[in-house]
Image: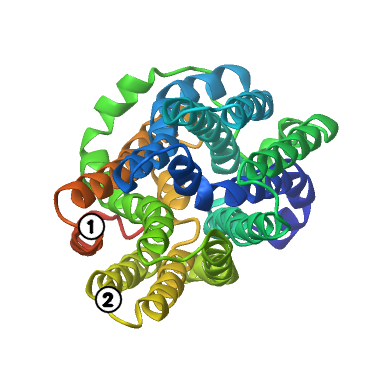
Amino acid sequence: MSGDETERFPWKRVAGAVYVPTAAFAIGEGAVIPYIPLIAGDLGASLAVAAVVAAMLTIGQLAGDVPGGSVVARFGERPTMIAAGALVLAALALALLSTNVWMLGAAIFVMGLGHAVFALARHAFMTTYVPLRFRARALSTLGGIFRMGMFVGPLIGSAVLGLGLPLASVWVVFGVSTVVAIAVLVVLPDPTTAFERRPATTGVIELQQERTGIWQVVRRNARVLATVGVGAAMLSLARSARNVLLPLWAISIGLDGVTTGLVIGIAGGVDFALFFVSGWVMDRFGRLWSVVPSLALMAAAFLMLAVSHDLDAATAWFIAAAMVLALGNGLGSGILMTLGADLADRRNPAPFLGAWRLTVDLGGAAAPLLISALVSVASIAWAAGGLTALCVVGAGMLLKWLPRKPRD
């Protein structure tokens, strides 16, 4: 892509239509995620049941991946993101009114559905329109914005609770941020119109009009999904496990909600700070140089937790492990989206991206259930040890099967 093409590429419109709504949505989600186990506990859930309730977010995402691909292909990216935001608002209302664990779990499941469709729509847009030369940096920036939300959101949640407001107030924080995201999408012009008017010489590919069934795409790409996809799912598993395990760990060693939110929020800042480094490494040296170190660092952090639960310095080990997890996750900022974009057909990416996200989200959905099972039959320390092993397996699979050059 020439310098002239770069200048004519409408980055500002992309930022307004994709990055700003993502930032608002992520801040709200970040304000909620650390407190889901605590809210479930207030409704009478045990540690194991609280893990299952937290798992409903990723299970909802999993359930939304396949229909999400079809919805995006049929209705377009921006209308789908707006509708997904409205679905999240409905879920938040149900969560706020929940009087038992099962109502809360249902609300979080629907929230996961909305998250999946919102994320798939923005991923399809970026895959279609961002040139390969800038793909990793654009998607790592998208991932970095989500991490910013994971940094700012818990701090906001912690501040709200520090004012003496009830735990349920975090749902209101998420609701306000979702309304902001929807408002931005409604007010700003649809960025796809800038591309549809562009001549073919600009290097932007026209959208393919034919629609391919997502299950046909799954069959066609079965081998890559079973190898690269499963390896990527191990990273998704580790990320999801981090979101569930850290709050549960804090409860198990006696930390309060304010301290938990503060530690997780600071870790989110470390995570967020590395997003551009991740994109630069991927574009400069290749995808492996991001994903393998990410998994290795997360394996080391889970191992730190596994051996430290009963030590006198358990709180210090918890803080250190949270920071190493953040470092590992930050070095992999945008990698799952980038790998999906590398493997997708840019003319009509939504069906493959739905299959890709289904595969990696299976890992994310399995993590809380795995943690719940291990906590029930063994201990939370054994759960951390199992996650260490799975991170090592995922790194090995990607070293073996990940293509060294992305598909344009």
Q: Of the two numbered discs 1 and 2 on the same chain, state the one appearing first in sequence.
A: 2
Q: Is residue 201 above or below residue 89?
A: below
Q: Is residue 166 above or below residue 385?
A: above
List the residue tagged with mark 1: 383
Q: Is residue 222 above or below residue 258?
A: above
Q: Is residue 239 visible?
A: yes
The amino acid beneath tag 1 is: Ala
Closer to the camera: disc 1 or disc 2? 2
For the point 48% across and 25% down, which residue is it? Answer: 103
Going by the image, does 354 lie left or right of 359?
Answer: right
Q: Is residue 408 visible?
A: no
Quarter location, residue 50? top left
Q: CA distance from mark 1 to mark 2?
A: 13 Å
Is there a contact, CB below 8 Å, between mark 1 and mark 2? no
For the point 35% across and 82% down, which residue is it? Answer: 313
Give residue 28's position: percent from left, percent from top: 65, 46
Quarter location, residue 250? bottom left
Going by the image, does 115 lie left or right of 175?
Answer: left
Number of other residues with Cα within 10 Å of mark 1, as a class: few under 14, some 14 to 19, many 20 or more: many
For the point 64% across and 54% down, which residue is it? Answer: 157
List the residue tagged with mark 2: 308
Give residue 365's position: percent from left, percent from top: 34, 40
Number of other residues with Cα within 10 Å of mark 2, as a class: few under 14, some 14 to 19, many 20 or more: some
Which image quarter holds the N terminus?
bottom right
The amino acid beneath tag 2 is: Ser
Q: Is residue 65 above or below residue 343?
A: above
Is disc 2 placed on a helix, strand or loop? helix
Q: Nearer the viewer, residue 266 or 36?
A: 36
**What color scheme is it?**
rainbow
Q: Residue furthest left?
A: 377
For the point 73% across and 47% down, which residue is it? Answer: 20
Which circle marks residue 241 in the picture?
Answer: none
